[in-house]
Image: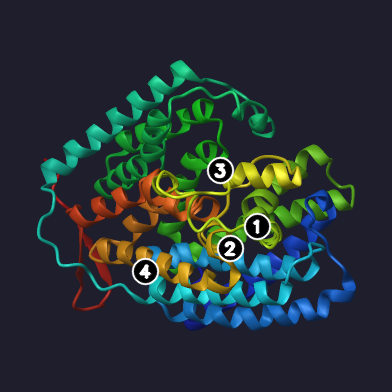
Amino acid sequence: MGGIGRGLMPESYRLPLLVFIHVVVTCVSLGCVAQLYPEYHIFFRPSDLASTIAVVALFSTVAILFVYAEFSFGYFVGFYLFTMILGYLWLNQFSDFIYNHSLTRLSAAASAIAFLLPALLIRSPLPQFWTLSPRALDRLIDVILVFGAVVVSIGAFYDFQLVSIERIYDYRESLRAPRGLNYLMAMASGALLPFAFACCIELKKKWRALTALLILLAFYPVTVSKISLLTSAWLIVMTVLSRIFELRIAVVVSLLVPVTLGIFLFTLFQFNWIPYSTGIPYFGLVNFRMVAIPSLAMDYYNEFFSKNPLTYYCQIGVLKSVMSCPYNEQLSAIIYKAFGIGGYFNASLFATEGIASIGPVLAPISAFVCGLVVALGNRASANLPPRFVLISGAVLVQLIVNVPFTTVLLTHGAVLLFLLWYIAPFRVERRPAQGQPAASLPASP
């Protein structure tokens, strides 16, 4: 692992250079997005470019944390959320919404730092009192695979729509599955099946790994969700990257390469070298919906909640039943109706647990608490092979970027995955000669 690129440049320069390129590419991508999607209030004005570059450059000094921190689950999550805040600071400079842009810029930067400090720096292992035996792990994998297959089969009785990704919002409102079943499907696809897949990769159980991927893919026509459609491919990509690159570089490359490809296709389209149907659907999916939208959500949430009551966490189901709430619908639906944008606007912890709940002034406190929770995941997985953590946590990273943090913890099974990490029998040993971590795998029964 990590053999690619050795000898091309000193190893100490490789990661900082990639992070710098990633910052530049992210900003270029947002400039391209502004040309295609101005109806989403995404703009670009050359007159504001100098001040925008100054803001982005100042915030980018935070990236030094990724150069010196070791890989962990928090590193993976943190880099994606760093990119989101970077994107918001860019969009904030060109936003035509009427709210306090200076305050929200400071709040966003402070929230990023407040999250990253515990998420990157707290990695000490939890004291472990019990672990699964190798035989119990093998049985657990089978149970998860059967559970996933049963849950998605039941879901198919309620909803089954083979639709293109461009039409998913036409069918989203017609889904009929009970809430309890939706919770089970979310846990299976967000935490359990990725964990089983990662176990199979470590144990070299190829057929069961393939079974996990096929079950995950089967969730798409049942849930009509972009994440469900892309989960299997995402796990394969992260598995391949983890074998080619050092894991921190794999994290950067997992964002940098898709966004760069989108810019390349956009450029070919702009010069009329390829048709719209060849390049723009990919650009729209990756550069716009996967990268720009999470950042743009913060712009919308700042605009809406600068003029409307804060939630004070009443959007959380448990709290909503015991406290008054100014909103009866989910925040994603409220934002959708307020701005008339295409599709419901789910958003990350910075927008929901921060901006919507307690406002931009106190938002860094919320981000710090969320960082502490992610640090708990670091501690639960501290003794596991880093590649196993990367693969098994890859889907949760995408969810944390796009979904409220409390929803990821409870509905999508992040807490359950942390528990599975804690009891997993994989261990890391140190090779005395090289000092590099090596996985100590349980024997197959």
CA–CA distance in space, label 3 to label 4: 26 Å
Numbered label attached to residue 301: 1
Q: Are marks 1 and 3 in contact (CB under 8 Å)?
A: no
The picture places residue 436, in percent across and down from the top left corner, at 28, 73
Q: Quadrant of residue 47?
A: bottom right
Amino acid type for the residue under numbered disc 1 = Tyr
* Mark 2 or mark 3, earlier in chain: 3
Q: Secondary structure at mark 2?
A: helix
Q: Secondary structure at mark 1?
A: helix
x 44%, y 71%: residue: 368
Give above or below for 69 relative to 348.
below
Residue 8 visible? The answer is no
Residue 414 visible? The answer is yes
Q: Residues within 10 Å of mark 4 (few under 14, many from 20)?
A: many
The residue that label 2 is drawn on is: 355
The residue that label 4 is drawn on is: 372
The residue that label 3 is drawn on is: 330
Amino acid type for the residue under numbered disc 3 = Gln
x 32%, y 33%: residue: 207
Amino acid type for the residue under numbered disc 2 = Ile
CA–CA distance in space, label 4 to label 1: 24 Å
Q: Nearer the viewer, residue 430 or 32?
A: 32
* Mark 1 or mark 3, earlier in chain: 1
Give above or below for 195 relative to 242.
above
Q: In the image, which is nearer the foreground, mark 2 or mark 4? A: 2
- For the C terminus, the image quarter is top left
Q: Farthest top residue? A: 157
Q: Nearer the viewer, residue 33 or 237?
A: 33
Amino acid type for the residue under numbered disc 4 = Leu
Q: Secondary structure at mark 3?
A: loop
